[in-house]
Amino acid sequence: MPTRDECLQADRQDPLAPLKHQFELPAGLLYLDGNSLGVLPKAAAARSAQVVTQEWGQGLIRSWNTAGWFDLPARLGDKLAPLIGAGPGQVVVTDTTSLNLFKALAAALRIQQQAAPQRRVILSERDNFPTDLYMIQGMMDLLQQGYEMRLIDDGLPLEQALDDSVAVLALSHVNYRTGAMYDMAAVTARAHAQGALAIWDLAHAAGAVPVDLAGAEADFAVGCTYKYLNAGPGAPAYIWVAPRHADDFRQPLSGWWGHQRPFDMAVAYEPAGGIRRYLCGTQPIVSLAMVECGLDISLAANMNDVRKKSLRMGDLFIDLLESRCASHPLTLITPREHARRGSHISIRHPHGYEVMQALIARGVIGDYREPEVLRFGLTPLYLGYTDIWDAVDTLKTVLDTEDWKNPEFAQRGAVT
Ligand SMILES: *Cc1c(COP(=O)(O)O)cnc(C)c1O
């Protein structure tokens, strides 16, 4: 079992350690929830003041041109691209992950309707993030053409579920609850071998694990910026389309921002030739501008260093949990195998909700997901090995003292 001194030593040798000074981290708090809402980049305060007081306050309407507001979704998309193995002109930052998934799904189904109209199955996973499943259900409701949602689960593994009736496979690269990661290249190849298109949700992957969309030959991808990319609450998400599908990309949310010449004010919709056709309406510029502050820090880090540190922090977490908290009813649900693990650790406890509330009261913030799951996000940009040691130490205290039995910890807020 590693000692706290060994963790301090490891932090001193960590090449990513200086990056934490680029974030505003509240004193006395251990934040292991960057997989849900990332922390505030220090640069964001000055940047938001500039956008609000200068660009909006002084520039007013002129800023659409003079401050680069109009081009911002594509410019940020180009910046984000290297983090997900995409090229320039292939990504836009816009809308929410849910909306972008809807667009990608519509485009993929449209391609399949022409190529293979008999395919009527949208394949996903029972344990996928619920909004992804809800958007698929909404799409099927709209189409009303005998589409079927099929879900991979314990009784129906991927190999069995993926047959020649599948039009589209829509999965999360890293599972939000368990932290399990798919081999994107292998699964995409399997989908293609069956004639299906693959849409990947990168919400828990981008900025957390190396992603290579081009290398995996994926078809579409979506993801959010407010988790590991530290862009701020509700910051716009992104969408990527493989260049081979770019011209076929037709999406039903055909708003004026996706028009070839929006300011012609034409009656008929004509999609923009390039990446702008993925946009719908006027963009939330203040929130969009914040995306760049988080991205700049992720781009300053070497993604292989980030991955190495994340896995080492995960191993440390598991090791400490099993050596120091062994007498408590905790079950690790995150895969141990590096190749199958994202960047958070999930454990079950019969009173997971109360245990998490007691932890938060002691200044260790993780989060809780049904059923019984405690989640701890490992964010190499601003957490160190000693932080992990201290977090598990606090968990041990909460469990040993049975602190969590205090009735106040059983009360639930709207957001867990
Ligand atoms: C967080 C998350 C989302 C969030 O979608 P929003 O539309 O931004 O609320 C979607 N999918 C997955 C897999 C997520 O983890």
Image (spheres, grey):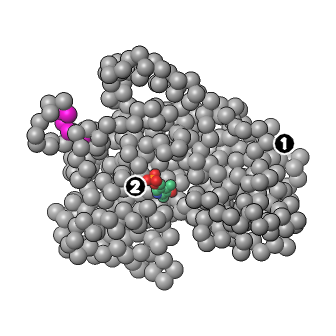
In the image, residue 159 above or below residue 376 = below
Q: Left of 244 or right of it: where is 354?
A: right
Q: Which mark is residue 92?
A: none
Is the residue under label 1 in contact with that under label 2 (CB below 8 Å)?
A: no
Any part of residue 226 in sight: yes
Secondary structure of the residue carrying numbered label 2: helix
Numbered-mark total: 2
Q: Which residue is mark 1?
A: 9
Q: Left of 372 or right of it: where is 299?
A: left
As for residue 355 lying within the magenta part, the answer is: no
Residue 122 drawn at (x, y percent): 33, 70
Any part of residue 308 in sight: no
Highlighted range, magenta:
258-262
Residue 377 drawn at (x, y percent): 65, 53
Image depth: mark 2 or mark 1 in front? 2
Residue type indicated by callout 2: Ser
